[in-house]
Image (cartoon, rainbow, N blue to C red):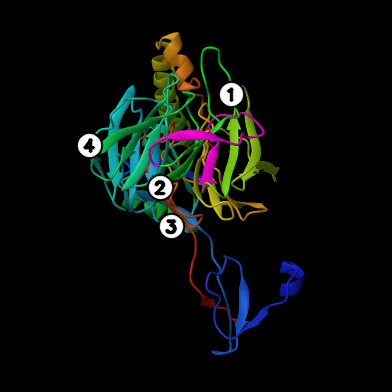
Amino acid sequence: MSLFIYGTATNTGKGFFTHQDRLDFFLSGYPANVWVVGNNEKGAVWLASKNGITKTKAEAQTIVDAEITAAQTEWDALTDEQKTMSLGRPGNITLP
Amino acid sequence: MSDYNVIRGLKIKYLSADPSNPENGQVWYNSSNLRVEGVVGTGAWASGGVVGSPGTTCAAGTQTANVIMGGQRPGNTSNVEEYNGSSWSEVNNMPYAAGNLSGLGTQTAALAFGGYLNVTTTAKYDGTNWTTSGTLSTGRELMGGIGIQTAGLAAGGYRRSPDNYPTQVEQYNGSSWTGAPSLNTGLYGRAASGTTAAALVAGGQTGSTSNAVEEYNGSSWSTVNARPYAAGSAAASGTQTAALNYGGNPASPQTTTVSYDGTNWSAESAMANNRAMSGGSPAGTSGSALASTGSGAGTATEEFTAPSGTSSISLS
């Protein structure tokens, strides 16, 4: 069994995930509303309750990659001065 | 079976009443109610309201009364948003637009200062209106902001053209800046907390990230135990003896959260969202903090709450 569930869900703000959720299951957010959730009953129920759309790991990674690529392209188009100020090109992210 | 005095190196205190300010993990025997009691549990981050304009910023205030000021959201902005513990709302803009600026104080007595490029401007916020008041003697960005609007410190930072990382510290009295004793190491993006009499700065960066930590006693800075992780531009809450640092590292934002008890650092539960150069809660505590937006986090806000209050402990 996979350690994680992958999915997309829109962060609606307060109450989207609670302290108890964080104690009940692993949860990590990524660009483009991608969430990596601990693969237990409470994690699965949480993602479903947030109208989340389950993805495979590869699908989730593709979504994150597209978002990062867009951010990197945007950064590459900055002037040298703007690049200096931004303190770094957005780095790639590998989902766990 | 392990004994408490083996695990903690202490015997359980025999007290006639609960201690006034117990720490997480502390256990005692209450002779009045005949119970073994303590503060036990795990702190964790929960989601908060989404900000209106995401990006890097600086902040003042607490978890339930916060303000984010300026930054790059995106592009240099004078935008200001306030948080009431559940949602953000846009309020009066600052008198200047800047990225990489610094902040300190509370939601109703905040200070924003410096920024890109070698900005010396200082702006005060009273919860409604902004006024400029005083100028830094050396314009710089990403300083550690410490203290309150009438007694603040600007520690270290980044000065451009030519690039350098001054050890300079300046003290604000509510209307003007004067020189204060210098840091031992010049870094920018230090996570800063405390007061003008008892301050803490942790981490930071130049070409590389640092985990160096310094304490200030009102007259000099001394190097103390290093933070467990190296990163610039983490956020901080609390005091010199009870601080929380979270996130950091603009090029590769992270979720790391650690606490400091005045001597040692401990790992805490990580945030759900990676973030650096985020809004923090400089007037918050090590057990109640806010992390808003920042590089890598989009519009997401998170609220850290550590256990508090006394619980009876079953010995069966």
Q: Which mark is on residue B92?
A: 4
Residue B196, position as x, y percentages in the image: 52, 46
- How far apart are the two marked residues, 3 and 4, measured between alpha carbons? 32 Å
Q: What residue is shown at x 41% (from left), y 21% (from top)?
A: A71
Which range of residues does the magenta coloring cover?
A: B174-194
Specify the amino acid type for callout 4. Asn
Which callout, 4 or 2, points at the residue further toward the start of the chain?
4
Badge 2 is on which residue? B302
Q: Nearer the viewer, residue A23 or B144?
A: B144
Residue B271, position as x, y percentages in the image: 48, 46
Specify the amino acid type for callout 1. Tyr
Badge 1 is on which residue? B165
Badge 3 is on which residue? A19
Give the left or right position of residue A46, taking residue B236 as reference. Answer: left
Which callout, 1 or 2, points at the residue further toward the start of the chain?
1
Circle 1 packing at 10 Å, graded few (<14), some (14-19), many (20+), is many
- How far apart are the two marked residues, 1 and 2, measured between alpha carbons? 31 Å
Residue B187 highlighted magenta (yes or no): yes
SS for callout 2:
strand
